[in-house]
Amino acid sequence: MNMANRLNQLVLALAAIACATAPADAAIFGNYKVKGESTGILMGGEIVPGDAAKFEAFINQMPRAPTAVALDSPGGRIDEALQIAAIVKRLKVLVVVGDKEGTPRICASACFYIFAAGASRSVIGPARVGLHSNSVGGVETSDATASTIFAMRWLKRELNVPDVILAKMALTAPDGIAWLTPGDIVALPNTEFKVRCDGEPGKPPGMCTFIDDHTAGQPPKPGVYPLVVPAFVQPAASPNRGRF
């Protein structure tokens, strides 16, 4: 079964157990500059029904295909997030979770599916990526547990998400959130974690790239530094629970 068929099967399974939820503001899509040009998309806010269609419509009105997608979302509807993830995977773009004017962005809950679908990924600390198991209306029912298992298999098979991240998804209850460590993040293929730092002696401040301590014994590459990652201040409002 190809990816499109697997994704359709997963979306249908999630939609089949969808339940009514309180109204929420839809995700907002805007231009995101890449190297000074508006060739990217910024997606912010909660993911609600209809957002996948809006995302596709925003892409269609762009003068050229996007090269990056920046995320700032606490999550929301998983079925919509999966459809957006399929579009992101098709576009083969860079996915970024960074900051805005010093305020760290987050990508949590259902947003993780979109983050994982990037051809490459970049997290700029102290921005954070988090996830948890699925729920139905905030309750971890047997159907929700089954959907978590189904989603984990899809993430592993289609997006090569490593077991260390999938374990956190499985072990974190829907009303909790497991923030990925820099080591977790760089365990994803083609993914980097950076923080603003002083850089090399005698040079102006720049970006330093986290290197996983598990590769200890190998000398750092030029321009790549082991980091003391700054403490992350959790947002005042907890991310919305991933839900159907």
Image (spheres, grey):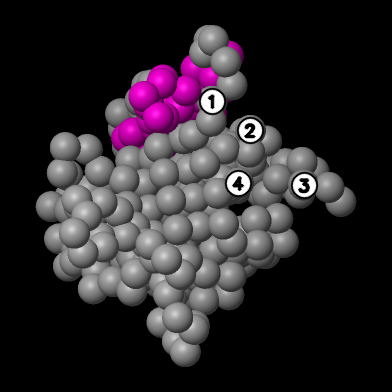
Residue found 25% across the figure and 43% down from its top: 99
Q: CA distance from mark 3 to mark 4?
A: 15 Å
Q: Earlier in the sequence, mark 3 or mark 1?
A: 3
In the image, 195 versus 46, the foreground residue is: 195
Circle 3: residue type: Met
Q: CA distance from mark 2 to mark 4?
A: 8 Å
Secondary element under disc 2, as helix, strand or loop, is: helix
Q: CA distance from mark 2 to mark 1?
A: 8 Å
Q: Earlier in the sequence, mark 2 or mark 4?
A: 2
Q: Earlier in the sequence, mark 2 or mark 3?
A: 3
Residue depth check, mark 3 versus mark 1: number of the one nearer the observer? 1
Q: Which residues are magenta?
A: 33-60
Q: Which residue is mark 1?
A: 66
x and y percentages locating residue 217 in the rendered image: 47, 89
Q: Earlier in the sequence, mark 4 or mark 1?
A: 1
How crowded pointer 1 is (Cα within 10 Å; few <14, some 14-19, many 20+) is rated as many
Q: Which residue is mark 3?
A: 3
